[in-house]
Every structure is written in structure tokens, then in C-alpha cells.
Image (spheres, coloured by chain):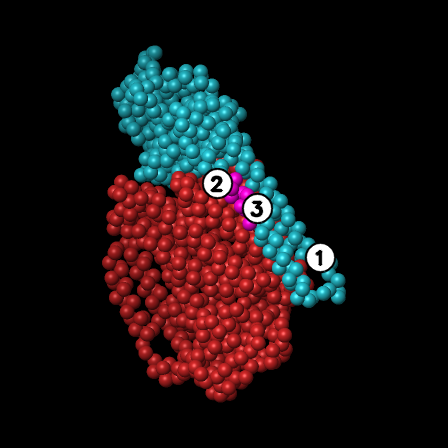
Chain colours: A red, B cyan
Amino acid sequence: MTAASPPVIDLPPAVDPADHARLRRTYEPIRGFYAWLASVDHKSIAKRYIATCLVFFALGGLEAAVIRAQLSRPENGLVGPDTYNQVFTMHGTTMMFLFAVPIMQAMGLYLVPLMVGAKETAFPRLNALGYWVFLIGGVFIYTGFFLNAGADAGWFAYVPLSGPEYSSGKRVDIWAQMITFTEIAALIAALQTIATVLKLRAPGMSLNRMPLFLWAQLVTAFMVIFAMPSVATGSLFLSFDRLVGSQFYNPAEGGDALLWQHLFWFFGHPEVYIIFIPALGFISQIVTTFTRRPVVGYPVMVLALLVTAFMSFGLWVHHMFATTVPQLGSTFFTAASTLIAVPTGVQIFCWIATLWLGRPVWRTPLLFVMGFIAVFTIGGLTGVMVASVPFDLQAHDSYFVVAHLHYVLLGGAVFPLFAAFYYWFPKITGRLMNERLGRWNFWLLFVGVNVTFFPMHRLGLEGMTRRVYTYLESTGWGTLNLVSSVGAVIIVAGMAVFVVNLARSWRGGAVAGANPWDADTLEWATSSPPPPYNFADPIVVTSRSGLWAYGDEIPVLQGLRTDLPQVLVTTVMDAEPVLRHIHPSPTIAPFVMAVIIGAMLIGGIFTPWAYPAGLVAIGVPWLMWAWPRRRSYEHQEELKGTFSLEAPI
Amino acid sequence: MTWLQAAHSALHPASAQADRVGRLYNFLLIVAVLVFVAVMVAALWAAWRRRPIDEDTSPARDARAHRVIFAGAAATVAILFVALVYDLALGRSLTRRATREMLTVRITGHQWWWEVEYEDPTPQNRVRTANELHVPVGQTVALKLASADVIHSFWAPSLGGKKDLIPGHHNELWFTPTEPGLYRMQCAEFCGLQHAYMALEVVVEDSKKFAQWINAQRKPAATPPDTLTARGKLVFESGPCATCHAIAGTSAAGTIGPDLTHIASRRWLASGRLGNTRANLAGWIVDPQRIKPGVLMPSNGLEPADLQALLNYLASLK
């Protein structure tokens, strides 16, 4: 944490760096509704993304409330089996595909370019396309749901139940196509993150100086790229079976029902970590900021992320132990499922050590981190229990697993996410959230989650199976289910406090200033909310401590033009500047393309001809998008060898 | 309806296998509780310990922290390794098939009921029933699991772990019941509208009672003792019932629904949905969609007299 002297930079300034107004015009050339549709600003798009995900979170939460109301007493008739099956399918689908994965990516789309110190994300137009496709997919499946065509085969959609013979109508087709929409969006966001982290980092931010949040986002993005093709293949086969009479999953014609399960879980298990690893990134940043010191064991933390990501691809069969797995296979998957606890455990130890060594400042984000440690540890420990095949065969598909997965996902993703909301809200809006309401929010959520989900462990062991729309009184499950439903009411109250806090703080919160928490990462070096161009000049990074290495003077690298959206491209390993790249201007092409893709995928449910027609139509926005712009080549300048950047770590 | 109580809890094992898994669970639970307490004590202490104002912040403290983290990681690996060895050893021993002669029963999952078929080398000794499984205490029983439609899962928590019934695959599950009694199980894999009401009762009884039961089940249906019952038989055979249901010894030979040869001997109707009483049976025959919406059985608008005769006949099928 020694303050280094600003490095010598012999790059001639191209224009006056103080010309903020000009930069603003450059990055925001048009205004109004059209500009909103055509925007390629990563902050604007990420904000929409986050807001959209929160709407889906609320919808998924309402579905959960219906589930808890229905199960609050035996033989309840609030909803019938058909509605219930749609509701729980939509709950799982929404939470996994429309909330948890995309919001983690959306947080990244907002924060990654800021944290690497870049003016923009790597592919701004692609970014816009990803968002619109996601939005159309989400609206599409909910339109189906509200028209009583909600998917009803579970979020895992096992064949043959989801196949043509046992799920007639369009419900499952809508579900499978929604998967396609979210895959496209997730892959785009992943490419975005990888390119931004690897190529747009601030000069001097070598890989070993990268904040842990960026590592988490980078690792997750690679996981998305490896995991998504599997579910894409799976849902494509399912669509083929349903729409054009292929027989991939039909055992009577040489297909195999288990093929779906392998394809689905080869994606589905890493998906849990795709949700969880970004959350680890949030926690590392928050712990750093509020203990006023770097997290203990940086190399260990980075390695733990990589090991977790790698191992998470070797766990998928533990969802399938009850299908009968050969001895050797189940040994491998048990061992992997057990040992993945090690890297996560080590990270928790590192955070605890950091708390011990530092001087914690008890603001709401850190409170949520403590909640994460408590709730997630329970989920992790029951995870080790269900990794054991003999015990899993008792717990599998029972409420024990419902308890386990909600402890993992609420503890491992929702608590960190709330910590992140409280932590980055001032950066996004310029105002702080209310601390008092924040505490209420935390305690209601913490108590509610435990009251709701802890009794489910017991219910599962007492034989209550998952996805039942009701149960007989003689089962004796009534009391604990009622307790659980009361817990759900407490969760709803906690969420209501959050919404109130959000609404009140949006306009009326205390003004935050650039760096209200005195944090070390680069996003806090620009104003809150950041200007369209993020930073007037790229900040120079000289150590892992980021901003903490500097006093009031932050060294910057000058020489980017202000009359053109010029961004600095740096090398992968050491982040040495190599190129001044002209970024694309706002355009409506991504929006138009998303609409056509949407029409094609939705039409594809009704006629295969939608695909050739759609692919031809996509050519129009594609031409708009890719039409060569002379100026981007004229002003793209190679920098290699023109400057040196030497700085102590 | 306390007479309908049946055990269905992994916490009350009643088979050799479930008992061993129960002990593994107890071990894992104790370890988990200890680890949780240790982590929380460490976290809370680290968070809220009293800090001296002039606390040393030298790098030497970081080095000490590294050692503690390393020790924690080593302890984690050690604990997990012990748990892993226990898991795998138990897993191996449970999957080793018992060699001595076993009672084999074929269980076929249907939307939403269980078909139960006792295998026997002599064809006339085979028994076909539904939603009720009788097994003798102390003898290992092997269930051959198959599915007629979608994936189901067999799980009797007190008797041992679950196995899926997958179309196109053959799975097997075995257990050795140790205590006579009634044990409930219900389908554990989501299988559609009536997944919630797809239960089966396992009756574990001493071998004498079991022998009596299976001998009774081997007999064809009783001949109607009076004219009203005989009329009921006629209603069954000539009406829609026989399209889907079979009664051995009559012309009814449908295979879509459960075999009803000895329906009056069963404790439950509609796959554990209703106690087997005359009123429940009448309600079920007339309007099954109200009781299990989506079930494949249609509503039957029978004349009251026909219905009473039919109920008499079904009640005679002991």
C-alpha cells in the first residue's frame, strides 16, 4: 500500500483532457426516446438489465408466495394442480434463467468496464442486442404464462414428461424457446466480460493487480461459454422432438430419456456456480472496503475461484444418483461434490481472517456479508451431506434438497446481491441508501429465510417430496409447512422494506459523492453516477491496492481524443497500452435485430419456415450494424513501442 | 383417521439399509453442526472482537493469518476425507446385491399409480395388484423398477433410498425390512398433474401373514354371492370399467388402470388418495376428476341402482 509516484508517460496529449462537455457530446451524440432505443452505453443498458431482472425477481417471488400459501395447510384448494405446476415451474425458471444468472451478468456489465477503468465495454452494440433479446425472451414466457400457457414440466423439464407425448400444447415449446433467448443473452454478456477484462484494462492493471471482482466475473464468463452449449443442444433436441418429430429422447425409437438429464445438468450444475462466483466477487470487494485492508491471501482467492469453476463441471451427475450410476462414476462424482467445499471453505476462511485483521465498519453491505457466511455455510454443509450417494438417495427430490438449494442460492447469491445493491447503489444513482431501512431489510430477510427454509430439512427427511401441489393431513407435514409459510411472510416484509428503501433513496438519499465508502477500486474514481464516458482519461494503476495507492492526485494517461469515442486497448497480461480504438456510435440496429430474432424464435414454435425467413430478415439490421465506418480506421492508432510504463507493485 | 397412519420418515428407519444410511446421516449431521458452530464462532469473534487502539498492523500478523487459514484448509480436507471414506464404503456395501434368494417384485410406474407384480416361476402363482406392496419381515426384497410412461421415483423413506423408474431403463432397488408395520411411500420424481397423489403403502408382516396374503391374492375373484352383487359384476363387465380394469376370473381384462381382482383387500383407493370405504369408492367412481384432477379415469354417470350394485360387487372382491 505504499504510495507510488506516478509513472512516466511519454504519450503526447491529443486534445485538452478537461473538455468534459465535448466528451459528453461524443459519447451521447443524440437524445430522446430514439437515443434510448439506440443507446450503446454499457451503464444505460446494464441499468435496464438490472431493473428487468428485479422485475422478474419480484414475479418469481410472488410465485413463491403462491407456493407457500398453497402448501401452508394440507389438502388446500387455493390453486389446483395445473396452476400449481405452472407456478412452480415459472418460479424455478424465472429465478434461474431470468433473475439469478442475468442479474449477476448485468451487475458485471455495469461494473466491469468501470472497474477496469475503461470508457466503454468491448462490444457496445452487441451488449445492446443481448439485453433486448433477453427482454423479449422474458416477456415472451410471461405472456405465455398469463395466457394460461405457462410451462408446467418443471424448470428442469425432464423428458418424456416434457416431450410431445405427455406435454401437448405449446407450453413446453415456449419454455424451450425462452431458454434459447436467455442463452443468446448470456453468451453475449460472457463475451463482453471476457473481452473487456482482457483487453480494456487500465494501463498498469496487470492480471495480478486485478480486483477479485474482475477475476470472479472473468471466470464466470468462461464458465458460461462452456456450460451454455450443453443446454442449448438439449433444448434444441427437445424442440426438434416436439416440433419436427425427431426422436432424441424417445426410448421407443432408440432415443434416451437420460440424455436430456446429462445435457441439462452438465449446464445446470455449473450454473449454480455461474450464479455463485460473481457473488464471491461482490463479497471480496465489500470485505476489502469495509475492513479497510486488502483481502488476505489474494493468490489463494484467485486460485480458489479457478478451482471452483473447473471442478463445478465435474459434479453434474450428483443430480442423477437415483437414476442408477455405476460404482466408479458415482465415486468420482461423490468425491468431486465433496471436495468442491474446499476452495469455497478457504475463501470463507480468508474473509474471516480479513475481518479479524481489519477494523470492520458496520454498514449494511457488511451485514449482508455476515448473513451470507451464516446462511451459505448451512447450505454448503448440507451440500456435503447430499454429495454422499447413500444419503442423497434419501434426500434427493425431497424437501431436504429444497432447503439445501435455497440456503445455497439465497445465502450464496441473494445475500451477496443485496450487499452489492447497498454497496454500488450510490455509484449508480449518486445517492446512498438508507442505513436504518437497510438494517430492517437485512434482519427481516435473515430471519425470514431461516424460518422458511430450515423446517424444510426436517420435512424432507420425513418424506415430503418436491413439486407436490398438496399433501394429505395424515402425513403430518402440516405444522412445519405452516411455519415455513409464516417465514415466507417475513421474507416478503423484508423485500417490501428493500423496495421502499430503493424508492426513497433514488431521489431522496444522501448525496454520495465519487467515493462514499473510501474504496480502492477504479469505479470510485469517477463521479456518481459516472458520466457517459466513464473517465475523462484512463487511470494508471500501479499496485493491487488501486486507488488506495494514491493520495488526492490520481495519475492518468492522456492522449485520447475527445471528439471521437476513442478507447484505450491494452495487452492481456500486463495491460500495456497498445491501441487507441474508435468505439461504435449509437444505433438502432441491435434493437431491430433483437426484434427480428424474437419474431423468428417465437414464430419457430408455430412453423419451421420462421427460421429461413428470420435469417434473411436479420440481414437488414446486420448491414446497418456492420456498415464500414471510415473514421474508425483512420483514427485507430497503434501505440506499441511509443511509451513505457514502469511502476512498482 | 389414525388407523391410516403409516411411517414415512428417513429418521425412523425400518430396514437394514435405511438403518445404516440413518447412522451415516447422524454422523454427517454431527460433523456439520460442529463445523457450522466453529465457523460462526470464528466469524462473529473476528467481526466483533474488541480491538486495542494501538493494535499491531505489521505484515507479521498477515503471516500468522496465513498459517491459520492453512490449518483451516487442512482441517477441512481431513474432515471431508473421513466423510468421503465413510460415504464410499457404505455406498459400495449397499450396492452389493444380496446373493441369497430374494423375493422379486416388479413395480411399474404409471401416471399416477403403481402397478405391483409378484414374480413366480409358475405363471398362475404370479400376483398382480396395485398401490400396495406386501413383504415379509427379515427377507430381502428386490424391486424391479420400470415405467409405463414418464419418469417416476420409488422412495419409501423408512425402508431405504430412492430409485427412478425410467422408460427404457431397468433399475433395481432392494431392502431388508426389519420391523413389521405400515410404511408409506410416494412418487419422488415430478410426473405431472397428480404427482402429489401417487402413493403406495408397504405392508411389512411376518412370513406367515405374508403367505396367507399372497395365497389369497393368487385366487381369482370371488363369485358373486347374491343377485345384487351379480348385477354389479354385470355392470362392471358391460360398462366402461372393463375397458381399463381387469378382474381375474371375469371377462374384464383392461390393462390401462389398476387390477381390481382383490380391491376390497386394499386399504387405500386411487393410489393412497382415499381410504378404502364404500363412500369414498362411490365418490371416486362417479367423479374422479374432482378428487384427482387430470387423472386418466373418466367420470361415470351410473344409475344409482347400478352404482350400488357395483359397490356391492367391488366390496365382495376380498
Does the magenta-highlighted stretch encompass residue A331? no
The amino acid at mark 1 is Arg
Does the magenta-highlighted stretch encompass residue B80? yes
Q: Which span is picked out in magenta?
A: B77-88
Element type where label 3 sits in the image: helix
A380 vs A271, left or right, is right
Which of the 4 quarters of the picture holds residue A520? bottom right
Name the residue: 34% across, 64% down: A595
| Tag shown at residue B79 | 3
The residue marked by circle 2 belongs to what chain? B
The residue marked by circle 3 belongs to what chain? B
Q: Which percent across, then down, holds residue A40?
A: 42, 72
| Tag shown at residue A446 | none
Q: Which percent across, then down, holds residue A351?
A: 60, 59
The amino acid at mark 3 is Ile
User: Which one is earlier in the sequence, the residue at label 2 or at label 1?
Assistant: 1
Q: Which percent across, then down, holds residue A576?
A: 47, 77
Q: Which residue is mark 2?
A: B88
| Foreground of the two, A468 or B225 | A468
Q: Residues within 10 Å of mark 1 (few under 14, many from 20)?
A: few
Measure the C-alpha gap from mark 2 to mark 1.
41 Å
Q: Which residue is mark 1?
A: B49
Which of the 4 quarters of the picture holds residue A229? bottom left
Which label lies toward us, 2 or 1? 2
B155 vs A377, left or right, is left
Measure the C-alpha gap from mark 3 to mark 1.
28 Å
